[in-house]
Image (cartoon, rainbow, N blue to C red):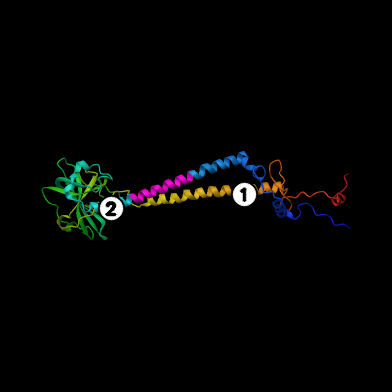
Amino acid sequence: MPSCPSPSGGGGPAARRAEGGANGRTGTVDGVYRFLLTPRWWGINVFLLLAVPFCVFMGTWQLDRFETRVDGHRDATARAAEDREADPSTARPLDELLPVDKETVGDQATVTGRYAEQLLVPDREVDERRGYYVLTMLRADDGKALPVVRGWLPGDPDPAAVPAPPAGEVTVTGALQVSEVPGQNGVPAAGGLPSGQTGAISAASLVNLVPYEVHDAWVTLNEGDAGMKAVPPAAAPDSGLDLKAFQNLGYTGEWFVFAGFVVFMWFRLLRREVEFARDAELGILPEDGDGSAPAGGDGEAAEVLPETPERRESAPAAS
């Protein structure tokens, strides 16, 4: 008995794909890739072309913000070092430097007045040693006071160990500083301090401790008063490598990851559509009206076998 010819494309879906590849059916825009011209894929491609440049732009912008903060920190540190060696002869009247900002912070200021109330500022470090500032209010002729840090002493605050301020009218010269904010730039945020102490050198804190107006700035003397150690000028606020700077660096990485993820998902969708289109073209996944492929009993696409004489003989007669 002659052998029965094997059905066309026998060997399963993998064999069908191999046969299609061997016959040169690689797919073109007019064939397998024609789905790229559908409205759905037009929308996907437009989204890709818009999302990737946007993510790259945002990542570059965040990186530029981080680099700006790094440069600002470097400049502020260098300027603070210069302010510590500033020439007192360059000092200007306080009124010409107010309000204090990043341009005037650290500049030499001079003011004349009389010392009044004295306060201690605990938990301050100088040369990596813990101690406290001696802060004395200097009242000018207009009645408004300027906080003046006369110096630093080691240890815990002790009013008995603090030298008394000079009596009478005095003229002081020092580096102009911006008001402190509790909890920022190393300023303690703890409250409940004893009488005669303050946690931050700022007008908002001092107006509750003295009965007169206070300038929204302060001065640290170039030379410590009465043998105390001078407090070096600090860099301008918001000019260091703080949490905001590293947030910018983190956002930079996130935006570039988003761009890579969009490209990855586009290639994954493209590969899936190409495989489906090739299977449908080879007859492994015959296209229905809704574009889906009927599944066989084993979960794979049902194959359409060609009709043979043996199959016609074995088929039940129509009733």
Q: Residue 292: x and y, percent?
A: 69, 45
Residue 299 in sight = no
Q: Residues within 10 Å of mark 2 (few under 14, many from 20)?
A: few
Q: Which residue is mark 2?
A: 78
Residue 76 in sight = yes
Which kind of residue does numbered mark 2 sit on?
Answer: Ala
Q: Secondary structure at mark 1?
A: helix
Q: Residues within 10 Å of mark 1 (few under 14, many from 20)?
A: few
Q: Residue 224: x and y, percent?
A: 17, 55
Please tell me the numbered disc located at residue 271: 1
Q: Which image quarter holds the C terminus?
A: top right
Q: Which image quarter holds the N terminus?
A: bottom right
Q: Which residue: 30% across, 50% down?
A: 75
Mark 1 and mark 2 lie on one chain; the one further toward the N terminus is 2
> Which contiguous range is marked in magenta?
54-71
Judging depth in this view, the residue of 291 and 158 nearest the camera is 291
Q: Secondary structure at mark 2?
A: helix
Is the residue under label 2 in contact with that under label 1 (CB below 8 Å)? no
Magenta part, dominant SS: helix
Q: Which residue: 53% across, 42% down?
A: 49
View extreme (top): residue: 39
Q: Quadrant of residue 48?
A: top right
User: Separation of disc 1 and disc 2 at Cα?
Assistant: 56 Å
Whether residue 5 appears in magenta in the rendering, the answer is no
Whether residue 62 appears in magenta in the rendering, the answer is yes
Judging depth in this view, the residue of 291 and 86 nearest the camera is 86
Please give the count of numbered marks on the rendered protein. 2
Q: Residue 280: x and y, percent?
A: 70, 46
Judging depth in this view, the residue of 29 and 270 nearest the camera is 29
View extreme (front): residue: 24
Q: Residue 61: x and y, percent?
A: 42, 45
